[in-house]
Amino acid sequence: MPLLETRVAPGWVDYNGHMNDAEYARVFSLAVEALMDAIGLDEAGRRRHHYTLYTLETHLCYRREAHEGQPLAVEATLLDRDAKRLHVFFEMHDAEGTLLATSEQMLMGMNQGSGRPEAFPEPVAEAVAALPDAPSGDWPPLAGRRIGIRRA
């Protein structure tokens, strides 16, 4: 089930006639916000818990072009977690299910008052535990990639 559904906005299209690379990052950022909503860190939850998520690292891979008006759906798989961090793998597909891009992200739970990392509030931790996750050693094939020039 998609975490986020949207369409390629006209302002996201560049001079090449397809979605600009920065806009892929925007869609995955919106997916993080949807994930936050799903685990109880919507606007009211952030206020109630004085807690939010920060993105520590992201690895975005472009697989196919997206064009103006094209429907997009983003799904998330939890790769790993601890008391205050989430390692999440996002996949962006079109309406036919074609993989357009992936984004692997490390997210950190933060106390908004102190600005310091802190364990998830209990209701958030319970919601995180209910997220779809990849069994240990059975990550999606495109997860865990590193950037570099392959040498023969």
Image (cartoon, rainbow, N blue to C red):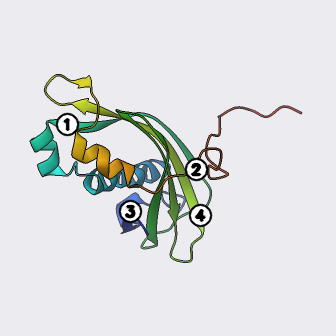
Q: Nearer the viewer, residue 116 or 57?
A: 116
Sequence-earlier tag: 4 or 2: 4
The residue lying at 50 percent from left, 68 percent from top is 67
Whether label 4 touches label 2, CB < 8 Å: no
- Closer to viewer: mark 4 or mark 3: 3
Q: Distance between the residues labelled 4 and 2?
A: 21 Å
- Closer to viewer: mark 2 or mark 1: 2
Residue 123: x and y, percent?
23, 47
Q: Residue 3 carries which label?
A: 3
Sequence-earlier tag: 3 or 2: 3
Whether label 2 touches label 1, CB < 8 Å: no
Identify the residue under disc 4. Answer: 99
* Label 4 SS: strand
Sequence-earlier tag: 2 or 1: 1
The quadrant of the picture occupied by the N terminus is bottom left
| Residue neighbourhood size for the residue with mark 1, other residues' Cα within 10 Å, grouped as few (<14), some (14–19), many (≥20) | many
Q: Nearer the viewer, residue 143 or 97?
A: 143
The residue lying at 40 percent from left, 59 percent from top is 12
| Residue neighbourhood size for the residue with mark 3, other residues' Cα within 10 Å, grouped as few (<14), some (14–19), many (≥20) | some
Q: How far apart are marks 4 and 3 (CA)?
A: 15 Å
The residue lying at 75 percent from left, 32 percent from top is 149
Q: Distance between the residues labelled 3 and 2?
A: 20 Å
Residue 141: x and y, percent?
67, 51
* Residue type highlighted by circle 3: Leu
Q: Which mark is residue 21?
A: none
Identify the residue under disc 2. Answer: 135
Q: How far apart are marks 2 and 1 (CA)?
A: 28 Å
Identify the residue under disc 1. Answer: 51
* Residue type highlighted by circle 2: Pro
Residue 115: x and y, percent?
21, 24
Residue 121: x and y, percent?
22, 38
The quadrant of the picture occupied by the C terminus is top right
